[in-house]
Image: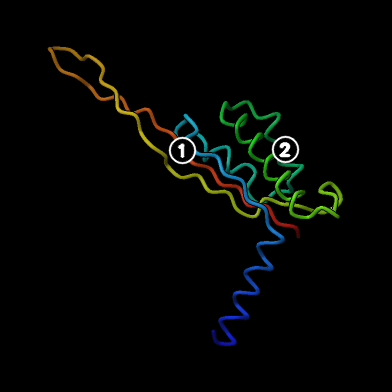
Amino acid sequence: MGARKREMANRLKADKKVTAVAKLNNEPSSPRKMRLVADIIRGKDAFHALNLLKFTRRHAAIPMEKLLRSAIANWQAKNEGEDASKVSLYVKDILVDGGRTLKRISPAPQGRAHRIRKRSNHVTIILDKK
């Protein structure tokens, strides 16, 4: 392995020690609704984002709050000597991707059938310290 490749690998390894990731797969709400909640907390301080999610009236905020708590717990597990409330953690990145879609059929007029798409999504939260 060359010197540049080794340096880059060491830099990426050091970044992974600082950041914490939490994933939520196949959450049964549409990605569009979840993205509206994700846009509220993107780039915010982690504990401020928890307060925002607690008082957001959208239904998608409940699993998002649980996922953010999981990401904070993952960060604490990686950095055992530090306290998460003292360090300024922030939501570095939040991704909402489409998950599997369940296809159902609903009766329609004149003997036809309409397709109902029950969408789900995958959410990934990445926390970092400033």
- Determine which of the numbered discs, if any, sits on residue 50 in the image: 2
Q: Secondary structure at mark 1?
A: strand
Residue that label 1 marks:
121
Q: Position of residue 48 (x, y in %)?
A: 75, 42
Residue at 57% across / 26% down in the picture?
59
Q: Residues within 10 Å of mark 2 (few under 14, many from 20)?
A: some
Q: Residues within 10 Å of mark 1 (few under 14, many from 20)?
A: many
Q: Position of residue 101 (x, y in %)?
A: 35, 33
Residue at 53% across / 48% down in the picture?
95
Asked if residue 32 lies left or right of residue 76, the reply is: left
Image vertical order of residue 119 relative to residue 93, above or below: above
Q: Secondary structure at mark 2?
A: helix
Amino acid marked by disc 1: Asn
Q: Position of residue 119 (x, y in %)?
A: 39, 32
Image vertical order of residue 94 relative to residue 109, above or below: below
Quarter of the image with the N terminus is bottom right
